[in-house]
Image: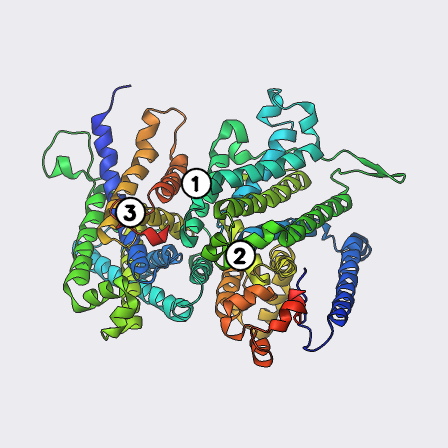
Amino acid sequence: MAETLVAPARGRAPARTESEGGRLDARKLGLFVLCLAAVFAYPFVDQALGWGRVGSFMSIFVFVILAMGLNVVVGYAGLLDLGYAAFFAIGAYTMAFLTSPGSVFVIQGLVPPVLQNFWVALVLSWFTAAAFGVLLGAPTLRLRGDYLAIVTLGFGEIVPNFFYNADGITNGTRGINPIGKPPTIELFGLSLGFGPTDQRNWYWLILLVGLLSLFLITRLYASRLGRAWQAVREDEIAAASMGVNLVRTKLWAFALGASFSGFAGSVYASAFQYVHPSQFEFSISVMVLSMVILGGIGNIYGVIAGGLLLASFDRILAEAMRDPIQRLGEAVGWDALAGHDITQDRLLVFGLALVLMMLLRPGGLFPNAQRRAELTPEDEDITVAETQTLYDLRAENEPALGERA
Amino acid sequence: MDFNASLFIQYLIIGVASGALIALIALGYTLVYGIVELINFAHGEVFMMGAFLALTVVGLAGLNADSSWSSIVGVALLTLAAAMLFSALINAGIDRIAYRRLRNAPRLAPLIAAIGFSFILQNIGIYWLGANPVTAPTLLPNEYRAFNVLTEWFGLDTRIRLRLLDIGVIGITVPLLAFLTWFVYRTRTGKAMRAVAQDREAAALMGIDINRTITTAFLLGGALAGAAGMIALFYNNAARFQMGFRYGLFAFTAAVLGGIGNLSGAVLGGLLIGVVWALSDGFMKEYIPAWGAQWTPAVIFGVLVIVMVFKPSGLLGEQTADKV
């Protein structure tokens, strides 16, 4: 059963609890639909006000997808992956290899035309990234947490290094330029094209891919596998003795986590029509990690919020704030501020996000309820323990706690 | 193609010199890991800070190629001391601010904080010297940089060059290693460090101040990183805010290769990684046409992944069943 957000008060009938939960869910759903409608309508607002930020939001959404995918690995399964950008790169290059007219594989006729279709390539990128997740995970998942982190970091360095240097296949530092686009969609008499002037359609496409990822990830979290991930994260030994296959569970986390960055990578490559190894460096992995940690490890909506916050700082805010801050510096006569370029502060912001979160709020801004309980064991269920005997036999017959129902 | 022995020896020499440098950084990882079991991710940036301070100090001293030998040596020693002190304080400061509070937190919390600090320090590096590489003033005149010890001093007729620069690197590194060995194995504080590494609680029960001992480890590791930073600055003749990342990862690989937590392992690993680095940078392309220095990081990270997967305890590491 889904977690109830508010612990039901003691003594109420279960039926009432459920109706309360239902009403809460309806309110949440309403909020969600409202947000969604606003996000979907944004390109019109943007056009009306002439902001021209649709392109920035496209890359912000891609980063949010990445953060959601990394959350599967780091948040759900508790495996620290410092090379996540490698899977992003693999997704992007898969799309480029399959659909770009400049790709070696296409030129040599190795790619059957059906695979050159954007949608097919999108699904294939998903599988390729997942396959590489298994490839990396299989030998390394035996390692303890911090060792695993470093191995993934090594992998995350090798992959862009390969794309930089394997000139004959990847075009090296020149990158791969035209990349396949989705064919024009005819829908209700509208024709939705994906040319360079159709940013709005791209925006919606990326949003849809993001929503699909969100749907898949929330379903996964509630599935048997998702519960196994949480069990492994909380206590490997206990999980193993309950019959959870550790290696298989972790491998699935790695593969599925990686697969979503395959999504992100392939839409990113196609939307911006360009892949270059420098787009996938270590700082990207850390940026995505900062999003997950800032938002709240393990809480998908928190992670989305964290992703939106940091990515919009990276893509919009820093740039937008540069001039006002410099003007403020001039106004108060502080030279350091007047000459300061805030777009140079990216690393500082990500770094501070990581350090401050670890020190002050290890669960993130919007912590996952279970994760919070793990991180601060003292205040775990104290209220329940005080008001209720721990082993209440009646609970076996008539569940008093909402969670047990 | 025939095996070119003199070329091989040439790259071996370069490898040993850069390996000595890596060993200095690797020791910092190993010292800290041995005691608090933390991969101090910010260590590479502590090294970078040392290089930046050295650059600033030498700039202030206003030396040039015409300065007298005594002033060059004096300034070099002063810079070395300043860089060591600076890096040591940064390293211990980070421990004081963050790691100490996370001692009892889940294992990944201090690691994530360390990654955060590594980014913060990189950004400070950008503020300090800008985002582009900065060239170091040439302390050693160019004729001495290229000076071949083997022909000039020993009168050997050989194509192998042993530069004064390489000797300088080894000449600074060896005394530092000797000092560290003496400190850890012969002094009271060193003994306390080993005790804390072995069993923190038991050491505390014996009256050892745990926090002070851990701070000492961070100070020592930082000082070595600072020295390495100064050496790297003059060895490469340049510094950049990203230098810590590459060197740091190479050094971490060295520490793992040698067996993390093991001091002589770090030195051995450092030398091996240095030699692999030099061979991959230059020697390999004699035999593999498509090879080039750009593949070196992939090779070294490949070594890292392979060691981690097949022998996480490293070459000289003890059996650490709980670590895998």
- The percent coordinates of residue A143 (x first, y second) are 41, 48
Chain at numbered mark 2: A
Quadrant for the N terminus of chain B, please. Answer: top left
Residue at the image position 43 percent from the left and 49 percent from the top: A148
Q: CA distance from mark 2 to mark 1?
A: 22 Å
Alpha carbons under labels 3 and 2: distance apart:
51 Å
The residue nearer to you, when weighing A334 against A42, is: A42
Q: Amino acid at mark 1?
A: Pro
Amino acid identity at mark 2: Ala
Spatial distance from mark 3 to mark 1, Cα to Cα?
A: 38 Å
Mark 3: secondary structure: helix
Q: In the image shown, does A325 or B288 lie closer to the viewer?
A: B288
Q: Nearer the viewer, mark 2 or mark 1?
A: 2
Give the numbered dot on residue B235. Answer: 3
* Left or right placement of residue B219 versus residue A140 in this view: left
Q: Is residue A139 shown above or below A21? A: above
Residue A231: image tag: 2
Task: Say whether residue A180 is visible.
Answer: no
Residue furthest to the right in view is: A189
**Residue identified by numbered label 1:** A139
Instruction: Look at 37% across and 67% down and name the residue there.
Output: B95
Mark 2 / mark 1, whichever is N-terminal: 1
Quadrant hosting residue B34: bottom left
Lateral position of residue A39 relative to residue A384, left or right: right
